[in-house]
Image: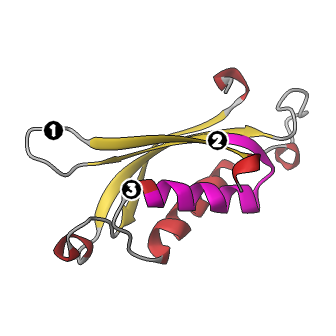
């Protein structure tokens, strides 16, 4: 994945219900999402028109909608669900998603990083 041809959303704070123990999923917690997407269309020569690219606000909103959809045990599942929704809604060739969760004392975060292509969905 070439990051020079990517749209990046960094440090998106997304509330969700996630965790293996039932008690952990009972309260909302905030995960941090970093996302890189490669649009199907080139980002060069857009003529300063948003119609030729992916709207960042709509992309971020997609993350929030998926996270609020239902509780999950694993952040891996949340990442895959977010990726599926992005591929369904936007013209994207590939994406990488990283989700960080603050869970253990003495650790800044536990995280997963997954990469998907349009062939995955």
Report, in whole angstroms, how far the alpha carbon at label 2 lies from the one at label 3: 16 Å
* Side of 12 where 117 appears, left or right: right
- Position in image of residue 29 (x %, y %): 28, 63
Dot 1 or dot 2, earlier in sequence: 2
The answer for how far apart the CA atoms under marks 3 and 1 are is: 17 Å
Q: Quadrant of the C terminus?
A: bottom right
Q: On residue 120, which mark appears?
A: none
Residue drawn 46% across the image and 60% down it? 78
Kind of element beneath mark 3: helix
Q: Secondary structure at mark 2?
A: strand
- Regarding residue 93, the answer to whether it shows in the image is yes
In the image, which disc is placed on residue 107? Answer: 1
Name which residue lies at 55% across and 62% down.
81
| Coordinates of residue 23 in the picture (x, y in percent) | 17, 75
Disc number at residue 75?
3
Task: Report which residue position mark 2 lands on.
Answer: 95
């Amino acid at each position: 994945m070439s990051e020079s041809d990517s749209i990046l959303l960094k440090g998106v704070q997304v509330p969700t219900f996630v965790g293996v123990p039932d008690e952990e999923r009972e309260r909302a917690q905030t995960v941090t999402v970093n996302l890189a997407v490669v649009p199907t269309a080139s980002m060069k020569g857009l003529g300063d028109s948003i119609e030729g690219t992916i709207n960042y606000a709509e992309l971020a909103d997609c993350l929030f909608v998926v996270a609020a959809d239902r509780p999950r045990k694993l952040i891996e599942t949340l990442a895959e669900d977010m990726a599926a929704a992005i591929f369904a809604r936007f013209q994207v060739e590939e994406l990488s998603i990283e989700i960080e969760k603050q869970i253990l004392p003495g650790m800044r975060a536990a995280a997963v990083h997954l990469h998907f292509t349009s062939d995955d969905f």
